[in-house]
Amino acid sequence: MTNYCFKHMAIFFILISILAPRVLSVVEDCGAEEDNSCVNKSKALPLKIIAIVSILITSMIGVCLPLVTRSIPALSPERSLFVIVKAFASGIILATGFMHVLPDSFDMLSSSCLKEHPWHKFPFTGFVAMLSALVTMAIDSIATSLYSKKHNGGVTNPEGDQEMAVAGNHVHSHHHHGSLSTKDGLDGKKLLRYRVIAMVLELGIIVHSIVIGISLGASNNTCTIKGLVAALCFHQMFEGMGLGGCILQAEYKFMKRAIMAFFFAVTTPFGIALGIALSTTYEENSPRALITVGLLNASSAGLLIYMALVDLLAADFMGDKLQGSVKLQIKSYMAVLLGAGGMSVMAIWA
C-alpha cells in the first residue's frame, strides 16, 4: 500500500511538470495594474534562487525535527509534550487551509478578470472545497478498509517495516488473538490509521505547496517576493512539523520516512523552478490561470481542513490520552490556538 502511494506521488510530480506549462502558459491578461517600479525580472531571479535554497532548508528542518525526537525521551509519541506539540502543528495545518489557501481561492474565482457567468453566479470555491473534503473522507475510509483487509491475518515485522507479511495460506504470527502491535506497543488498527493519515495529508500539502511555488516563481515583483520568501520559510517549517509528527506516528522504516520528508521539502522549490520556467508566458491574472490555480487551491483547502479537524484534532482530543486528563486538554487547546493564531497572522504577508 505504501509503495503504491509513493509511486503515485512520483507520478503526480511528473504530471504537474508536464501539464502545468500547457495549462498556465497563457499570455492573455485582463490588464491588472502593478507597480512597475517593483517589477524587475533581472533582480527577481536572484531572489527566487535564494527562495529555493532557503525554503528547501527550512522545509527539511521542519519535517525532520519531529522524526529525530524519538531519541529524546521527553518528546517521544507516548509523552504528553508530544501531544501538545502535535496539537500546535495541527492548528498550523488548520489555519493554512482556512486562512491561506481558501481565501486565495475565493479571490481568484471571484476575480473581475473572469466572466460573470458562471464564475460570479455560483460559489465554486466553497463547492469544490466541500467536494474535496467529502472525497478525502471517502479516500480516508476506503484506504483504511483496504489497508486493513490487505494485512488481515498477517504479522507485524519489528525488524523491517513493521508491516504485515503473509505467504500463501501460511501465516507466521507474532501477535495474540489476531491483534496487531508494534515494538512500541502501538495497536495495529491505530498504526494503519496513522499511515493512511500521513499519506493523505502529504498529498494535500504537496498540491498546496506546488501551487504556492509556481505563483512565487512566475512573479517578477521584487517587492512582493521579499516578504513572501520570509513568510513561506516559516510557513513550510511549521507545516513540516505537523506532517513530520504524522510520519513519526506512522512508524515507517527509515527509507520511507526519508522519501516522504524529501517529497515535502522539494515541492515548493520544485514549484518555484517551474514558475521561473513559465515566467515569460505565465500571467497570474489571466482567466485560465485564475481558474486552474483557484480550483486547485479550493480542493487543497478542503483536504487540509478535513485532515486537520477530523484525522488530527478530533482523533487526538477524543482519544484516551486527552480524555483522561482535563489539564492536558487545556494545554493542547492552547497549543492549537497558538499554532492557528500564528499562522493566521502570517496571512498578512503570505
Image (cartoon, rainbow, N blue to C red):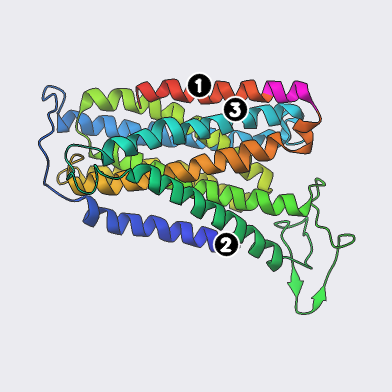
Q: Nearer the viewer, mark 1 or mark 2?
A: 1
Rendered view: 149 above or below 260 = below
Nearest the eye: 323 or 85: 323
* Residue assigned mark 2: 3
Q: Quadrant of residue 19?
A: bottom left
Q: How many badges with numbers are in the image? A: 3
Position in image of residue 172 (x %, y %) = 83, 69
Kindly tell me whether residue 337 is visible in this rendering.
yes
Mark earlier in primary sequence (3, 2) = 2
Q: Amino acid at mark 2?
A: Asn
Judge from the rendering whether residue 16 lies leftward or rightward of residue 160; answer left or right.
left
Q: CA distance from mark 1 to mark 2?
A: 36 Å
Whether the magenta-drawn stretch holds residue 273 is answered as no
Nearest the eye: 214 or 87: 87
* Residue assigned mark 3: 88
Please tell me whether mark 3 sits on a helix, a strand or a loop: helix
Please tell me whether mark 2 sits on a helix, a strand or a loop: helix
Q: Which residues are magenta?
A: 325-331
Report the disc number at residue 341: 1
Q: Amino acid at mark 3?
A: Phe
Position in image of residue 271 (x %, y %) = 34, 44
Rendered view: 153 above or below 316 = below
Q: Quadrant of the C terminus?
A: top left
